[in-house]
Image (cartoon, coloured by chain):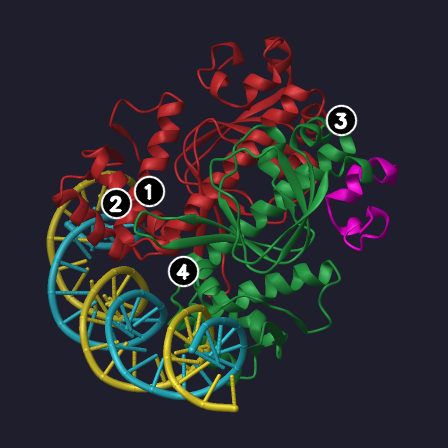
Chain colours: A red, B green, C cyan, D yellow
Amino acid sequence: MQCAECPLRSSSICHVFSRDDLAELQEARLRQVSLPAKRVIVREGETPSEVYRVQGGWGVRFKMLANGSRQILSFVLPGDFLTLELLHDGPIHASMLTLTRVTLCAFSREQAARDAYADSKRVHAIAHLWGQRVCDLERTVVLLGRMPAAGRIAGLVLDIHAQLTRRGMAAGNEFPFPLRHEDLADALGLTPAHVSRTLTALRQDRLLEIRSARATILDRDGLRKLAT
Amino acid sequence: MQCAECPLRSSSICHVFSRDDLAELQEARLRQVSLPAKRVIVREGETPSEVYRVQGGWGVRFKMLANGSRQILSFVLPGDFLTLELLHDGPIHASMLTLTRVTLCAFSREQAARDAYADSKRVHAIAHLWGQRVCDLERTVVLLGRMPAAGRIAGLVLDIHAQLTRRGMAAGNEFPFPLRHEDLADALGLTPAHVSRTLTALRQDRLLEIRSARATILDRDGLRKLAT
DNA sequence: CGCGGCGTTGATTCGTATCAACGCATGTGG
DNA sequence: CCACATGCGTTGATACGAATCAACGCCGCG
């Protein structure tokens, strides 16, 4: 797909990097990559030479612990930029994995890092992305530190729904949701078994329904109350 | 105290903002403020007109929940900058409270926001600060999501010790630690009672000792193992 | 058709919360 | 200088939420 027709351009970093010059953006794009599900994109500590704008599909950023368990730090959605830390030298903080087939638009890390601070509009856009990332993480800390299982799930689902809505990928209260119970568990500090029980309860209370890789919010106010 | 003699200058944002011109830094500093313990510095959502470099004392960034419980997002230590989000318009993400008497060096938010992006060295330094903040939060998410009480305490104490050491405020394995059990509990998703039990266990295992506002790491390897 | 991955459900265990009582230090006013 | 109040840490008994372990069912797929 050409950048000119990309529906995600306006809601992603591409917008800032090429408001005036679409041809320049198109030319900077090295390639589009398509990865199957369950493929490692990068590993913690690496410094790949490309950065990406996610074009489609879902992924996950996570850390492995010594005891073999996995903590998911965030989900990667279409429109996301991978990754901010590569714009100023740092190796990446966390490993990444695709959950579904994922399409990426690749750019040169080096060039992006140079261009990123070329004008103040871009600098502010990047600072804004950092701010969002921090905000998301802080919400996650609150969920993990102070909320019971149902509240954690409600909070996560509402966050994802808000993201997808902003990027035009949710039709009202229904939206794609390819996460398995195990993914939810690893993101929320729970076990798959308990996620199953909690989702069953949420469904019976007519708050939230997750079926065949789609989620439907049945009672937004109810969920918001749970996620306080 | 004059900026020229400030022992924290080299390990804080002041270094980047005035490597060449100490007089300029000194002049930019609006005032030094001293706040007693348990005083609110700012509340979530506000946009104060000053930013600060913490000169001394400890504080806390936190969010209150509807049910009255508190989640601490991070501790504020001498040398910290308050706050990054004020450098590009955002209102602050979380309320802040002093834990001890705190001394702050105040600067104009407006001027700092203008100067922040004036040269690429500063831009990179700020991006680096964002990166650290994200890194800290990600470690917190791992602690809260996947570790038992002893591991959480170990992880937090080691992080704080590393920070203080970097800033020259820890003498080997002993360092100031003015946190009450309730503060630890609110940061780590535990209750004060359970923090007490866990600290007792850590003391009996000769791993960590916390007494009269000071902490001593008795067995660093043991703690690191607990914190995985 | 059989197999593997995933979700569900039940029985049990475990970690932490909750609630309450108590001790100790510190501060304060009589 | 003592009597008392306050705040914080400690300890114990009990409750509860979630983990663990295991069995089973469903479904998609080779």
Q: Compute the Cα span from label 1 to label 4.
A: 17 Å
Q: Are marks 2 and 4 on the same chain?
A: no
Per the rendered image, the range of residues in magenta is B1-25
Q: Please tell me which residue is depicted at 79% across the width and 49% down the height of the picture.
A: B9
Q: Mark 2 = which residue? A: A226
Foreground: disc 1 or disc 2: 2
Q: Are marks 4 and 3 on the same chain?
A: yes
The chain ID associated with circle 2 is A
Foreground: disc 1 or disc 4: 4
SS class, disc 2: helix
Q: Are marks 3 and 2 on the same chain?
A: no
**Residue B116 to residue B31: above or below:** above
Q: Compute the Cα span from label 3 to label 1.
A: 39 Å
Q: Earlier in the sequence, mark 4 or mark 3?
A: 3
Residue A123 occupies quadrant: top right
Under mark 4, the amino acid is Gly
**Residue B21 to residue A106: above or below:** below
Residue B228 appears in the rendering: no
Residue B14 occupies quadrant: top right
Q: Mark 4 = which residue? A: B189
Do the numbered discs 1 and 2 sit on residues whose CB atoms are within 8 Å? yes
Q: Please tell me which residue is depicted at 52% across the width and 12% down the height of the picture.
A: A2
Q: Are marks 1 and 4 on the same chain?
A: no
SS class, disc 4: loop
Q: Mark 3 = which residue? A: B118
Q: Position of residue B20 (x, y in %)?
A: 88, 37
Under mark 2, the amino acid is Leu
Q: Position of residue B130 (x, y in %)?
A: 62, 41
